[in-house]
Image (cartoon, rainbow, N blue to C red):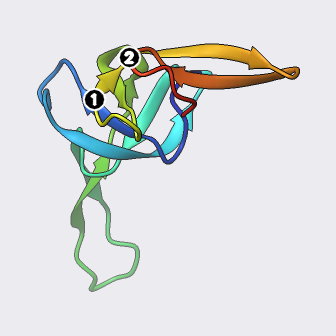
Amino acid sequence: MKIKKGDTVLIISGKDKGKTGKVFTSLPKEEGILIEGINLMKKHVKAKKQGEKGQLVQMPAKVNISNVKLICPKCGKAVRVGYEIKNKQKNRICKKCSQII
């Protein structure tokens, strides 16, 4: 997966189009990511003890990786990610400025 935990991304489609956020969970098998404060859903939580009230909790939902672009830390633009192999090591590179991410 080209996007990892800790990366800053730009949403390019959907209800949150144009927003940026930091990835806090990567889900490679589902081809998705969870982003802080983006694509929030509401979940009803039942009361666990008698006399306690139920709650309405907001939690982030999965965003498909095809709907986001990585923001390059060097040039600050939304870019596609490429790979470069040097010294038997695979590095992610920015397609615009060709710097290692």
Q: Is residue 97 left or right of residue 26?
A: left
- Please tell me which residue is depicted at 39% across the width and 33% down the height of the picture: 72
The kind of residue tagged 1 is Lys
8 or 65, nearer to the observer? 8
Can you give x and y, in whole percent of width and height, for residue 83 in the image? Answer: 62, 15
Q: Where does label 2 land, which residue?
A: 96
Instruction: Give the crowd class for mark 1: few <14, some 14-19, many >=20 residues within 10 Å.
Output: some
Give yes or no for contact between labels 1 and 2 (Cβ–Cβ under 8 Å): yes
Measured in 3D between alpha carbons, the distance from the residue under mark 1 to the one under mark 2, in whole angstroms, is 8 Å
29 or 65, nearer to the observer? 65
Q: Is residue 51 left or right of residue 1?
A: left
- Of labels 1 and 2, earlier in sequence is 1
The kind of residue tagged 2 is Lys
Task: Work out which residue is located at the far bottom of the displayed protein and give it.
Answer: 51
31 or 73, nearer to the observer? 73
Q: Quadrant of the C terminus?
A: top right
- Please tell me which residue is depicted at 37% across the width and 13% down the height of the picture: 66
Can you give x and y, in whole percent of width and height, for residue 98 in the image? Answer: 49, 20
Q: Where does label 1 land, which residue?
A: 77
Can you give x and y, in whole percent of width and height, for residue 96 in the image? Answer: 38, 17
Task: Work out which residue is located at the far right of the displayed protein and give it.
Answer: 88
Q: Is residue 12 left or right of residue 72?
A: left
Q: Quadrant of the N terminus?
A: top right
- Please tell me which residue is depicted at 28% across the width and 29% down the height of the picture: 77
Instruction: Give the crowd class for mark 2: few <14, some 14-19, many >=20 residues within 10 Å.
Output: some
Q: Secondary structure at mark 2?
A: loop
97 vs 73: above or below: above
